[in-house]
Amino acid sequence: MERAILHLDMDAFYASVEQLDHPELRGRPVVVGGLGPRGVVATASYEARVYGVRSAMPMAKARALCPQAAFLSPRFERYEEVAHRIRDVLAGYSPLVEPLSLDEAFVDLTGTERLHGPPGEVARAIHRRIRDEVGLSCSVGVGPNKLLAKLASEAAKPGGVYVLRPEDVEGFLSPLAVDRLWGVGPRTAARLSEHGVRTAGDLRQVDLGVLQSWFGTAQGAHLWRVARGVDDSPVEPEREVKSISHEETFPQDLVREDDVEREVRRLADRVAARLGEEGMLASTVFVKIRWADFTTRTRQVRLAEPTDHPFLIAEAALGLLGRGGVEAEAGIRLLGVGLSGLVPATFRPTPLFAAAGLPEVLREVRARHGPSALTIGLRGEDFPRGRGYTDPKGTKGRERP
Ligand SMILES: [Mg+2]
């Protein structure tokens, strides 16, 4: 059966929610993001984009470009609430809804036509209901797969609906720059450009064997497929990651604090790596500890700012353990470190170790040379405990149920 996939993307989501909640901001430039000295723009309203303000731009630059804008800290809890209302609308049309982030989702409409009408009509109904029931503008794309549905919603931006029919795919794709295609980052795009390949149409002219000789078997085949708009990936409703954790039961109980610290740093490193793979930052760190007598404790703390930094996560976890007294001499059977309150990494408020770019460096080295190619030092002398991890309200680690 021919598939019909819908992609919904909210327009300037965080800024639009602020304008919805604060009518005095409507029609005005609004910039949401980190307001600290090294903060970054998460979302700019269309009124601010006119001045050249863009996501991921340093906040200082945004202030210089558009000093009259309203500059606001993000309120993720509120955005999450709105995101749930949007998902409730989508869930009315298909059980297969895959949220990609707070403001984006895929919906598989294949086989729903008898119930809800043709996919194009469903797209227009969703678009209208989100405007009327939620009060926000969105862009909706429909296509025969996820790759094309997402490109269609980009074509619909801002505030439109674009239905891409299978017979129009080739003409639609041909003029697109290669870096608009999935899995084509700036490096791949630059290498393709060296071969004179700049658009999806150019890419389609290159034989599979040639692409594979340039990029290897797997990536060459991927490029060949995306150039033709081929994508079989399913809409996966469980895609949304709410928390990431890892725990380990030790073959022998740990009895020395040094060993506990080493294990906590290792676990933190691991969950940070997984967080990075998801493209998220964590607002909350939790720890789990089980002693030899099976007494188990969990504690959590909300960080001053979301992070994906293994050192900051380790420091928070060690802080939580230290607070209750580790009592390693009683024998520790299990340790766990977890992360929740996940937010998209596009919001990176004040990257304390940004200059070092450590998480990116770790990811890159491991991607190339395997997961154990680089591990974090056992003692972390360069990062004395307490630095970087701040707890401004003096929030105590709360017991988790
Ligand atoms: Mg969006």
Image: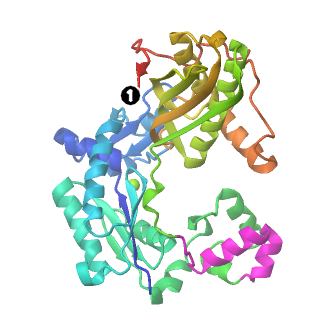
Percent x, y of residue 55: 46, 46
Quarter occupied by the N terminus: bottom left
Does residue 69 appear anywhere in the picture?
no
Residue at x-position 67% and y-position 72%: 222
Residue at x-position 58% and y-position 69%: 177
Question: Is the residue 244 above or below the residue 268 in the image?
Answer: below
Quarter occupied by the C terminus: top left
Residue in the foreground of this view, choosing between 323 and 228: 323
Residue at x-position 76% and y-position 24%: 377
Residue 357 sits in quarter: top right
Amino acid residing under circle 1:
Pro
Percent x, y of residue 77: 32, 37
Residue 127 sits in quarter: bottom left
Indicate the quadrant of ligand 1 in the picture: bottom left
Residue named by callout 1: 401
Question: Is the residue 56 above or below the residue 218 in the image?
Answer: above
Magenta extent: 206-233
Residue 231 on the magenta span: yes
Residue in the foreground of this view, choosing between 50 and 348: 348
